[in-house]
Each structure stands twice: as structure tokens, then as C-alpha cells.
Amino acid sequence: MTLAIFDLDNTLIAGDSDALWGEFMATNGLVDSERFREGNHRFYKQYQQGVMDIREYLDFCLEPLTQYSLEALATWHGQFMAQVISPILLDKALARIEHHRQRGDYIMIITATNRFVTKPIADQFKVDALLAIDLEISDNRYTGNVTGIPTYQQGKVLRLQEWLNQHPEHSMAGSYFYSDSQNDLPLLKKVDNPVAVDPDPELKSFAEAHGWPVISFR
């Protein structure tokens, strides 16, 4: 089965789920709204520029999750899905996933956003596997710590290789990866079929220079 790998934020959905979850928390009073919005905006700009320190960002964005039970967070996430995420699911992205499904490909999302935010979104797309930033849980709460390698930049390559080692029935032969971000260049360079989707300027320039397809799901 050929691997058809997709980035999530600004690729399969018309927005960044992590930044949008931060805004949802601020809007609903789950965090100090002014302070959190400032940090959320600052880190998102750093991500767009390809210079974000992932550990520093995770310390910031995961701390609010430690303040609530898993059940309370799940309830709020259900509202987040209905109010924020469902309206920005992209029909062309769904169609491309279905295209790969009809081909018999194995469909995977690899995202730099944590599993709490992204698992329900990945379920909407009915993918076969999700690699995301995994979070430690203790006493029915997130601890604020990460387990394993964060799936960010080169970390996506490392986590995918770990997954391949655990699933020897799969390989990179004929693989696809769809992404919008320069942060995903390490993995885009590893697959046989890299595809730039509504790319940022840096990725668009690199893709055009190397003859990669540049497409839009918008």
C-alpha cells in the first residue's frame, strides 16, 4: 500500500487548528485572554517564518490543558469542532483523500499540532493513522509534558521512520506528502511525490525550483 501523507493545518483545513484552539480558549475564558492571545499570535508568526522553538511553544500552549479534566476538555473540544473546525474543512482536500482511498493507498496525517487538538479532526477525515505531538496523561489530566519526538520539522521524518520500523509492511516506495509549509521541507524531500498545497512563499519558491506540483485545495 502506498503511503499518502497529509499535513493538517492550512493543508486539509483552511486554518491552523492549534492557533484556532488557542483563540477558542481565549474567547471562552479558559485562559487569561489578553496574555494568551499575545503569545498565540507571536508563536504563530514564528511558525510561519520557520523559526519557532517547538519546546518553548509547547510549554506555552500545553499549560492551559493541565488546568482541566479530560472530560471537560473533551466537551469544549466538541464545541470547537462544531463552531470552528467543521466550517473550514476543505471539500477538495476530502476529495483528494478519497482519491487515494479508492487507489487503495494508506492515508496518514502528520501534524505539528498535538494529538488532543487533532485526533477528532483526523477522525473527520477517516484517515488510517495520525502522527501528532503526543501528550503525557496522569490522574485524568494532561501533565503539560510531551512523550516522544515532537512531529515538527525534522521531527516528522524521525517519527515517520519510527512508525515504519513498527510497521514493516509499509515503506516509502511511491509515497506522497501534501503540505503548505516550509517547515515540512525535511519530509517533503524524503517522499517520492512531494506536493505543495496552497504553499507559503518559501515552499512555493522551492517547489517551483524543483519541479514539484503546486496545487490548491481552496
Image: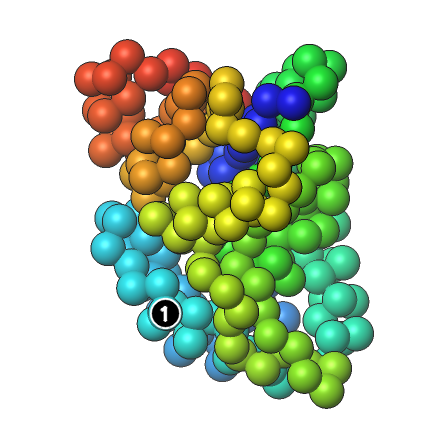
Out of 109 and 70, give the one closest to the viewer: 109
Q: Quadrant of residue 137?
A: bottom right
In the picture, the quarter occupied by the N terminus is top right
Out of 169 and 195, give the one closest to the viewer: 169
Q: Where does residue 133 sit, x and y in percent of width and height? A: 52, 59
Q: Where does residue 49 sit, x and y in percent of width and height? A: 25, 48
User: Local crowd at mark 1 within 10 Å, few (<14), some, or many (≥20)?
Assistant: few
Q: Across the whole image, how many numbered discs are drawn on residues?
A: 1
Out of 218 and 203, give the one closest to the viewer: 203
| Residue at x 49% of width, y 28% of height | 172
| Residue at x 50% of width, y 22% of height | 173
| Residue type marked 1 | Arg
| Residue at x 51% of width, y 71% of height | 146
Left or right of 152? Residue 134 is: right
Left or right of 74? Residue 110 is: left
Left or right of 9? Residue 211 is: left
Secondary structure of residue under mark 1: helix
Image: 33 above or below 153: below
| Residue at x 71% of width, y 37% of height | 128
Q: Where does residue 135 sit, x and y in percent of width and height? A: 58, 69
Q: Mark 1 points at which residue?
A: 55
Image: 85 above or below 90: below
